[in-house]
Amino acid sequence: MNTVGIVLVALAIAIGLVGIVVPVLPGGLLVIAAIGVWAFVEATAVSWVTFGIAAALVGVAEIIKYT
């Protein structure tokens, strides 16, 4: 992934992190989507493991949020 792509993914993650605090934006969804796009483009084992860990953490956070 080139530098512009990495910057765009980082920007989407940053907006998602703001969305966790500001309830107008879908924070967790933006973060996991950006990491998913990054993992798909990189297509390495490390990127997919990172995506899996992030997805698990977002899933646990959503379960805790609604229980």
Image (cartoon, helix red, strand yellow):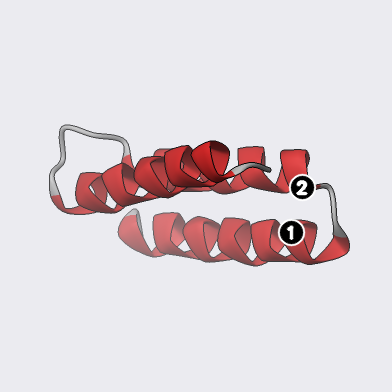
Q: Amino acid at mark 1?
A: Ser
Would residue 33 be seen by someone viewing this image from the given angle? no
Name the residue beneath numbered marker 1. 47
On screen, residue 48 above or below 49: above
- Classify the position of the N terminus by image quarter: top right
How many numbered discs, if any?
A: 2
Callout 1 secondary element? helix
- Classify the position of the C terminus by image quarter: bottom left
The spot of residue 59 in percent (x, y) is 53, 56
Q: Are marks 1 and 2 in contact (CB under 8 Å)?
A: yes
In three-dimensional space, the C-alpha distance between marks 1 and 2, rounded to whole angstroms, equals 7 Å
Callout 2 secondary element? helix
Q: Residues within 10 Å of mark 2 (few under 14, many from 20)?
A: few
The spot of residue 45 in percent (x, y) is 86, 62
Q: Amino acid at mark 2?
A: Glu
The residue lying at 13 percent from left, 45 percent from top is 22
Q: Which mark is residue 42?
A: 2
The residue lying at 16 percent from left, 40 percent from top is 23
The spot of residue 55 in percent (x, y) is 60, 56
Would residue 5 be seen by someone viewing this image from the given angle? yes
Q: Is residue 1 left or right of residue 55?
A: right
Q: Quadrant of residue 51?
A: bottom right
The residue lying at 64 percent from left, 45 percent from top is 38
Q: Is residue 65 left or right of residue 32?
A: left
